[in-house]
Structures are given as structure tokens and as C-alpha cells.
Amino acid sequence: MGTLKVIGKIELKQFWPDGLSDADTSSVLIAVDQDSFYFRKSNSSPYRKTKVFTNASVVGKSKAKLVKNNHIKVRLQGIDAPELHYKAPPLMASPSVTADIRKNYNAKNKEFRQNLSESATFALRKLLRSIDKTEVECEVLSHNVDHPREVVDTYGRFVANLVVKKKNKKYDLNLWLAREGWVVPTFYSSMSNSEIQDLIKAAKTGKKKKNRIWKFLSTDTGKFKYSLQLRKNVTDFTSGDDNGALIMPKLFRRQTGYEMQRKVKLFEGTFTDFLAKSKDPFFKTADFLQEGNQAKRSYLDDHMKNKKFLLGPEDMVFEEKYSNVIDANGNPVTNW
């Protein structure tokens, strides 16, 4: 299995409170150029420059350029931080969605945040600022890939580990955030067993940290604070100012959609009923480590009891949704 390496720079102005990037860096921008991309077929092979992403686009949830204005978007593999600004998905067209319902829904659908999202982002920003005040050189590493389409998700984000260097010491930001307790594991089937196990180990360290996510992580999905919304132009913030209960971010995203649909009376069932509509599939981590994609599938709604979710973030491996990568002429990019 091969490795894609992208050499670039992280611009710090994108992080909250100056910008909107948060600690799970689900859309962190990396400055790149045409000579930034390298691929090797195996650990024993040398890296060779590749230009397969030059003028390439992703075809997934939408069609978009992979390199735009000399930047790529990166989703940090295997981790999830509290949401800093999440809006429920737009309503799909259906006979029950009238113009008035859509207007009401859009008016109520704000950029919601979770407790500790600001503290987690602030911690990552602080580490990066200790290296450089404006931009930090980095490596974007996607391991265990053979095909160009395997390095990007359905939103056109490169799925990778982000590595920076401080005084000759390397920091894998994915593992650092997990060890510091600022994120929870969120595994996908594209990950290798060793990548999953490394993050499980890092999360065990993170659980021991005081006043971090794990202390406040709740299983109760019955509470939603409409007042918790994105705060802009914050000039005076101290880590811990936003301490409070939160649920795992993946559930929060679904909870937000549920609460917004309830507000406009488009959905009147329970949160479990709402989860049952989408039937989010995943493998239990222990099963996946043994059987891979042949393991039995589970669904989020199967693990709800009353309003509580019975599994922890590290107990699940979700199915990765790959995209197709096409070149400037619309032809599939199939090799490096």
C-alpha cells in the first residue's frame, strides 16, 4: 500500500477566532503549489512527484476542484472535535416541504456550536502559533492508499494525518489532539488496523486530561441548546470558558437536523426514529479489527435506549464514502 505526501503550509488566520476552521480541521486549508504532491508505492520505495491532482476535480456530493487558488482542504483522519459552527443540512424537495416550511426552516437553522469547541480550536491554534505566528510548514500524509480516489472523501477533502515540526520534534496533529483530549476518535473503514489502534491508545491518554472533552462527554441526546451558536469577533477568550456537557460530534450533527425539523413540525417522532430514517451503517470496532469490511453492520438507531446512546466514539468504524477523481477533460484519474 502506498502513501501520498503533500508538502504545504497551514495559514493560522483561518482558525477561530480569526477565521472559521476548528480543531477537527474538517476543512483546514493547506497552501500548496504544483510541486507539492508526492507518492510512493510502499514504505521501501522512494517518493516521486505526481501531478495527477493538477486541474483535477472530485465528483462526490458535488463537483469541485481539488486544488483551488493554490489550496487544498484536509480532513484530519480518525478524529472529531466538538462542532464550532454546524448548520443542519438543507431540506430535500418533497411534497411535505412547502415554501413556507422551507423559509421557516432556513430562518431557524443557525450555525450551532458545542461546548468545548472554542477551547479545542484555541489549543490547536496555540500549538501552531508557538511554531510560527502566521504560517506553519506541514506534511499531509495519506497512508495505505493505492488509488488517487482513495485519498479524498465525498466532499473533496484530502483525508490524512497532518504533521508539523517544532524545534526538530515532529507533531502528528491527529495523535496530538487525541492525546491532549481535545477530540474523540471517529474511525472509518479506509483506516488500517494500526491507525485505529494508535488512535485508541492516544485517546486513552486524552481521557486522563482534566477539563477536556472526555470529562464532559454525555450519552444524553435529549438536550439541545439553541442558544449555543457560533461566536464571532471574540477578543478575550480563556481555555475552559466554554466548558459544559456535549455529545459526540457525529451524533450532534444528526441531532441538529432533528431539532430543526421538529421546530418546523416536519418531523414529529423521537430522535431514535429520526436516526432510523437514515440508517447510518457502521461496524463495531472490535469486529472490524478482526474481520474488516466483512464484519456485521450496525446502525446508530439500534444503540439508542430512551434518549441515551449506548456506545462510545471509539466503539464504531463508519464506512468511508469515496469520490471519483477526474482530470481536466473529465476522464477518471486511475493511477499516479
Image: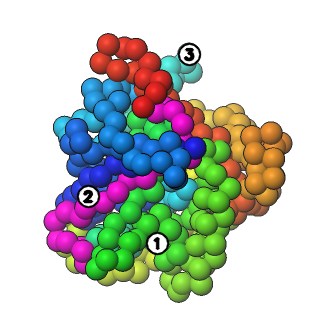
Label 2, secondary structure: give it.
Answer: strand
Kindly identify the residue that appears in the image at 46 percent across and 72 percent down: 176
Q: Amino acid at mark 3?
A: Pro
Task: Give the mark, 1 or 2, whose residue is nearer the N terminus.
Answer: 2
- Assess whether mark 3 and mark 2 are in contact (beta carbons under 8 angstroms): no
- Please state the horizontal and vertical placement of residue 38, each as a whole percent of the image: 36, 44
* Left-right relation of 309 to 78: right
Kindly identify the residue that appears in the image at 80 percent across and 39 percent down: 294
Q: Which residue is mark 2?
A: 10
Kindly identify the residue that appears in the image at 62 percent across and 36 percent down: 267
Q: 249 or 265: which is nearer to us?
A: 249
Q: Amino acid at mark 2?
A: Ile
* Residue 176 circle label: 1
* Left-right relation of 137 to 320: left
Question: Start and end of the magenta stretch?
Answer: 129-149
- Please state the horizontal and vertical placement of residue 276, each as a whole percent of the image: 73, 38
Q: Which residue is mark 3?
A: 95
Q: Amino acid at mark 1?
A: Trp
- Please state the horizontal and vertical placement of residue 253, each as a whole percent of the image: 53, 49
